[in-house]
């Protein structure tokens, strides 16, 4: 017995709606101040992963604007990226959301927002210098928490502390610095912040 065309159309529509609902439901429940991690697809991602011995090479912080969820990040420039766009940009769509173990108050969130204004629009720092002239992703989140709340998420290191012997890492260092690699430059890595005892994992996908 053949199924009526109208029934087939209804079944297909229901399946598509169910698929769309599943995709929407997959977005993590986040709050202002959450720190999100992913594996970037950028040209430098693999070198960062090898040097820091970490799966994660990019990060940002959640800040809501006009009722929408955004990731405040340093990527080409410091800017707000819609959460869904940010999640889709990561390798395999994988992400981890971490949250301060002590919940942020409304006044603390407001201080994060005010402090973020000083960084918005700054260019990305491909040389990983510890200055405010240019900013890279983990530096942005670290300085945001430090200056707004006096909270230091993760231990800063020197560039020379990382695993720099891998050929891919050495090639990237030559590309960025030539022979004058600033081994004493202060840096903060996504891995150092990922491992911070002040944060706890609340979502992963």
Image (cartoon, rainbow, N blue to C red):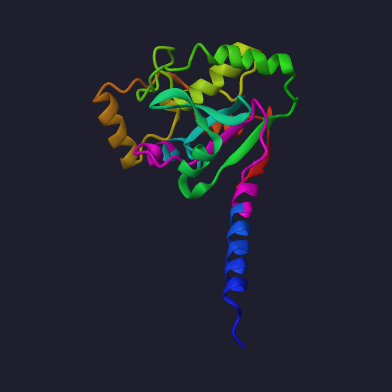
Q: Is residue 160 found left or right of 11 in the rendered image?
A: left
Q: Position of residue 55 (x, y in %)?
A: 50, 43
Q: Position of residue 191 (x, y in %)?
A: 53, 34
Residue 121 lies in what quarter of the image?
top left
Q: Is residue 70 found left or right of 74 in the rendered image?
A: right
Residue 174 lies in what quarter of the image?
top left
Q: Which residues are magenta?
A: 21-48
Q: Position of residue 45 (x, y in %)?
A: 40, 39
**Which of 121 and 158 lies nearest the eye of the viewer?**
121
Give the tally of numbered discs: 0
**Which of 28 and 35 lies nearest the eye of the viewer?**
28
- x 52%, y 13%: residue: 117
Residue 74 lies in what quarter of the image?
top left
**Which of 83 and 51 lies nearest the eye of the viewer?**
83
Q: Position of residue 58 (x, y in %)?
A: 48, 34
Verify whether residue 25 appears in magenta: yes
Q: Is residue 161 above or below residue 49?
A: above
Q: Is residue 22 found left or right of 140 in the rendered image?
A: right
Q: Is residue 52 above or below residue 133?
A: below
- Whether residue 201 is visible here, answered yes or no, is yes
Verify whether residue 84 appears in magenta: no
- Whether residue 188 is visible here, answered yes or no, is no
**Which of 17 and 113 lies nearest the eye of the viewer?**
17
């Amino acid at each position: 017995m053949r199924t009526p065309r109208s029934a087939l159309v209804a079944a297909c529509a229901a399946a598509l709606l169910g698929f769309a609902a599943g995709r929407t439901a997959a977005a993590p429940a986040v709050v202002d101040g959450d720190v999100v991690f992913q594996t970037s697809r950028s040209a430098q991602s693999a070198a960062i992963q090898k040097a820091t011995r970490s799966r994660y090479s990019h990060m940002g912080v959640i800040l809501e604007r006009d009722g929408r969820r955004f990731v405040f990040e340093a990527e080409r420039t410091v800017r707000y990226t819609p959460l869904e766009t940010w999640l889709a940009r990561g390798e395999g769509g994988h992400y981890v959301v971490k949250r301060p173990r002590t919940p942020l108050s409304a006044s603390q969130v407001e201080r994060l927002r005010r402090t973020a204004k000083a960084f918005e629009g700054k260019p990305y720092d491909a040389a990983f210098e510890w200055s405010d002239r240019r900013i890279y992703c983990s530096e942005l989140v670290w300085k945001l928490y430090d200056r707004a709340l006096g909270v230091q998420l993760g231990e800063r290191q020197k560039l020379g502390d990382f695993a720099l012997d891998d050929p891919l890492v050495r090639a990237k260092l030559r590309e960025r610095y030539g022979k004058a690699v600033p081994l004493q430059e202060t840096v903060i890595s996504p891995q150092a912040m990922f491992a911070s005892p002040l944060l706890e994992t609340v979502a992963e996908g």
